[in-house]
Image (cartoon, helix red, strand yellow):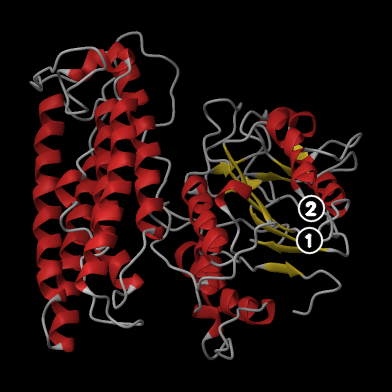
Amino acid sequence: MRVWAFLGALAIGCGTAQAQPRPAASSTEIYQIQADNREALDRILFECETSYWTVELDPIRHKVEISRYRKGGKPQEVTPPNTVPTLEDRKAIALWASLRNTCSNRITTFLQNAPLPGGVSRDAANWGNSFLVRSMAATGELVAALEQGKLTYSDYALKRGELVREVDAEHSRWRQAMLLPEADRRLREAEQADRRLKVFLADLSTSLNGLPGQTAQASPPPQPAPGRLSEAPLALSFPKGPERPDDIAVIIGNADYTKLGHDIPDVRPAHADAAGIRLYVTQALGISDKNIIAMTDATAAQMLAVFGSDKDHRGQLYDWVKSGRSRVFVYYAGHGAPGNDDGGPYLVPADAEASRIGLSAYPLPLLYDNLAKLPAESITVVLEACFSGQSQAGSLVGKASPILISSKAVTPPAKVTVIAAAAGDQIASWEPDETHSLFTEYFLRGMSGEADKPPYGNGDGIVSLAELEPYLKETLTYYARRYWGRDQVVQIAPAQTEKK
């Protein structure tokens, strides 16, 4: 992962921003914050490097630039052959891709939360850091193409080199533009650099999608291509809320259903959506990172352990709540499934079976009932899921035809606020590039302050449900119709003690 070259130019303290929401910091403060940020990022990078020392990556270590070192071993020179990966190589590449995604997500989260000197705009910092974030995502696409046999090792090395040079060049131009004294010219030239990179990355993605893959001899059953699951959160910052040391968040991102599930398509944006929500709850809601129960591709057993069962509601979440003091925030991104006379609708774990949803999924009514039994001050549930039996990735109802099934209506308990992505007979839509779900994207944009602006809000610095709802109807509903020609309307059910 090529990050060190960015260390001297990262916007996490570079002072290139011209918008200054706080008084400018002294040179000593700037130097100290830069040093602290570099030290923190160095630790993350070192931990990422050590994860690549596993012997399972040895089959490809001399063919592709991963890390040239293995713990206890000698450095190896990389010589990319002009051949597609073998079956053994592809298994190693799949592992490498998984490790890369984890590291990329950690780096992105760090960049979103890194301290800034006074006088440096968070928006400008996020903009500058987005060059690195997009570079990591594009490298993930290259790794996926390599694993699929669309690229030879030498093709990968060439395209990776082109990507690095392009990102370096446009990032450098962006930084130079941000130093210009004239505001109009500064913004114009910075946007030009950003736009050129977008065009380059779009062309790269299109070229990779158009390449035919090659099947390795004795290849295993098809697996989701590494890099197909979006990992990076939106580049947003949120108004910092007061610290809430007793509040608890549960964040579930179920994206990879191919690995453990049966006949269930992946929800490709779910990991990225969950990562964005994590930034929101730590920044805006003031929830400590240690008070977050985060589950990636949660299984049925894990969901039972956290939320409890119909026989015992006292799961992990119950144990973490402080009576009368904790506010609870629950977010779920993944598949939902319709219910019938026997139960449901359902949240679909990553190891569920499409033909046995009622036996392998977690009932939504049970979730509501068990949450209502928490001795919490307040409870909010945000659902990035639909319960129509359809998803943007395909049908969830066994081998059924792609028809919509009206989901059994479930009324949340009086003490629980629920914000759901769509009505029971609608599909929860994604961005066309599958990086984010539309509902979560515009929920986060709204909570970052956009929903507090006219004509939706009153500008008081607090986003209420009464402001969020019209904002989502203007954005989420519009883009679902524009992109996909379908209806999608947010469903908001406030707790009876809470005003909209």
Rendering coords of residue 147 (x, y %)? 29, 26
Q: Is residue 413 among what the camera can see?
A: yes
Quadrant for the N terminus, please: top left
How far separated are the C-alphas under marks 1 and 2?
Answer: 6 Å
Where, quadrant-wise, is the C terminus in this rendering?
A: bottom right
Would residue 487 be found to the left or right of residue 134 on screen?
right
Kind of residue at badge 1: Arg
Element assignment for label 1:
loop
Residue 6 screen position, x and y as percent = 18, 51
Q: Are marks 1 and 2 in contact (CB under 8 Å)?
A: yes
Q: Which residue lies under the disc numbered 1?
A: 325
Q: Return the residue at label 2.
A: 322
Residue type highlighted by circle 2: Lys
Q: Which is more toward the observer, 244 or 95?
A: 244
- x then y, percent, for residue 258: 52, 29
Residue 379 higher or lower than 255, as above or below = below
